[in-house]
Image: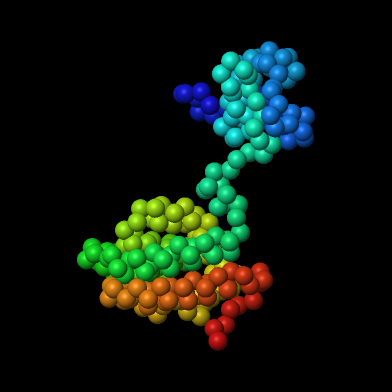
Amino acid sequence: MKPGSVRPSPLVEQAAERLRARIADGSWAVGTKLPGETTLAAELGVGRSTVREALRSLAGAGLVRPRQGSGVFVIATEPVEDWPTRLRRAAVTDVYEVRILVEVQAARLAAARRTPEDVTALDAALAGRRAASTGDDAAFVDADIALHAAVVAAARNPVLTDLFGEFVPALREGLIEMLDLVRMREHDPNTGDDAHAALVRAVTDGDADTAGTVLREELEETLALLRRPVTRTPYVPE
């Protein structure tokens, strides 16, 4: 996209799509040098500037790469998806499995590294989760995620914090859908409160083993619910 433009023109999008289709169907294999701009413009019935923008779009998608003085070459037959896009396309259960790996370790680190400010934030997040129990599923999920985010933040590892942030959109969508399907909160509006209170207490007390164990059990329970067949049958706690 050229600097200053809002979005590619429909003509550029159409040209890019036609070029992408030829790469996908094998007309131009990986390693092939594409025809020049003039030839492509004639084949597509567009101007050279449109071809140039279309090729730039394909380069951004990881399909082609220009080589100085040599031309433009095909380097892949399928677009390369960025990490957020791959997470959005992934099954929520797959994301959740990785979430468990990340968050359990984060909870253990949080218990070892928490500061007084972290403890205050955790207490506030737990109170916020409890307050959200009177709201709808979306508000409750947001408050739940905020508490987990506070635990991850207390681990004092910016990579863990950023990684958890990448998970949030997929997690939020999956959890809201799950609560709607199993109707869990009809029987317990503040479901999971005991486990979350125990998690906050363990982190506050500096008990890494308990923090990791409590969180793993809580997340694995939710994962089991996410794996249940889709049904509208109300969930009744045992």
x, y (%) of residue 100? 49, 66
Q: In this rendering, is residue 198 above or below 37?
A: below
Q: In this rendering, is residue 56 above or below 97?
A: above
Tell me which corner region of the image, top left, top right, bottom left or bottom right, holds residue 78. Answer: top right
Nearer to us in this view, 129 or 148: 148
Q: In this rendering, is residue 84 above or below 109?
A: above
Tell me which corner region of the image, top left, top right, bottom left or bottom right, holds residue 7. Answer: top right
Classify the position of the C terminus by image quarter.
Answer: bottom right
Nearer to us in this view, 143 or 43: 43
x, y (%) of residue 114? 27, 65
Nearer to us in this view, 219 or 125: 219
x, y (%) of residue 215? 43, 73
Q: Tell me: 24 left or right of 54.
A: right
The residue positioned 54% from the left and 43% from the top of the image is 82
Q: Tell me: 106 left or right of 10.
A: left
How was this image coloured? Answer: rainbow
